[in-house]
Structure formats: structure tokens, C-alpha cells
Image (cartoon, helix red, strand yellow):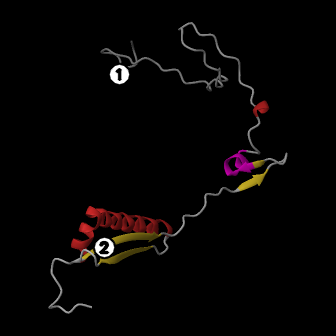
Amino acid sequence: MDTPETFHPGNTATALLSKIGSGCADADFARAVHAAADRAAQTKKRAKVVLTVEVDPRNEVGSLVLTATVEARLPKLPMPSTQFHQGPAGELLDQRDFLMGGGRDESAIKPLPAASSTSGRMSVARTPAPAPLADAPTIAPLRAGKDAAAGKE
């Protein structure tokens, strides 16, 4: 470990990561941390990002080659699943079909014949007309004039 006297201020982790691979190591590390944070929030489990920097001395030219690898260990997402019920004929029904009464039975649906249209629009299946309303009270016209208060016309 370097003592403070031999440590150069230009050798910070941020500066070195931005130079390794022309900034690729820095970008890979940032992406891995972002993916780990997202996955940890989704699964409520721990994620891990490992940054490894290898230093390879090149004695023949007197240089050092730094290689950075980023490894993200993310928790797995749960596999998609659906609850099924067995229908009366042995078919598998999802929750919606099970609650609707045993699956889709197209033979039970009998649409009414379409009404003829004179407007040129497509015909629409008829629905049964609603029952007539009970006898509605008749509305008497308002009387106006000087004798309206006396009940005369």
C-alpha cells in the first residue's frame, strides 16, 4: 500500500476508470451498478457488482497494461406462473375462465338476428327492448293570464 507521500493525486479510481479502455470500464461499472440497484429493488434481495483491475507489467517496454472487468451478480427474477383449475371436462382453466363458469362455451351463446338498417351503416345485433314503464303521470300545461290564480282560463 502506498504511503501518502508516494500517492499521485492523478491516480484516483475515477480518473483511472475513465482512462481504462477509453472510458469503457467506467461506463460498464456505472451500467452494472444501475442494473444491480434496479434488480435489488425489484426482488428485495442483495445484488453485487465486482470490479477487478488487473495490472500486467510489460518489462520489455517499461509500461503497465491495466485491464478492468466488471461482473454483476444479480438476484434472479421469479419465473412467471399462473394458477389453473380443472374444469368439468378436464380442461385447465385460468382464474378468469374458472370464475366465469367453466371456460368458454361458444355453443351456449346465441345472438339475436341483426336488425335491418336503412341508414347504410353496418347492422347491429338487436337487444331485447326494455319493458314499458309504469303509467307515467300526465303533465298539465301551465295556465297563464289574469285569471290563472283563480283557476280560470
Residue toward you, 12 or 33: 12
Q: Position of residue 16 (x, y in %)?
A: 24, 73
Q: Which residue is mark 1?
A: 149
Residue toward you, 110 or 134: 110
User: Magenta part of the protein: which range?
Assistant: 93-100
Residue depicted at 34% across the width and 16% down the height? 144
How far apart are labels 2 and 1 at the CA level?
A: 106 Å
Question: What amino acid type should be assigned to the residue bearing mark 2?
Answer: Leu
Q: Position of residue 146 (x, y in %)?
A: 30, 15
Front of the two marks 2 and 1: 2
Residue depicted at 30% across the width and 73% down the height? 66
Quarter holding the N terminus is bottom left
Determine the image quadrant of residue 33: bottom left
Q: Position of residue 99 (x, y in %)?
A: 71, 49
Element on which disc 2 rests: strand
- How busy is the neighbourhood of tag 2: few (under 14 within 10 Å), some, or many (20 plus)? some
Determine the image quadrant of residue 70: bottom left
Q: Position of residue 5 (x, y in %)?
A: 14, 91
State how many labels appear. 2
Q: Which residue is mark 2?
A: 66
Above or below: residue 114 compared with residue 63: above
Above or below: residue 118 compared with residue 15: above
Of label 2 and label 1, which has the lower sequence position? 2
Return the residue found at the far right.
89
Element on which disc 1 rests: loop
Above or below: residue 15 compared with residue 150: below
Residue depicted at 74% across the width and 30% down the height? 109
Residue toward you, 1 or 150: 1
Does the magenta segment cover residue 144? no
Quarter holding the C terminus is top left
Question: What amino acid type should be assigned to the residue bearing mark 1?
Answer: Ala
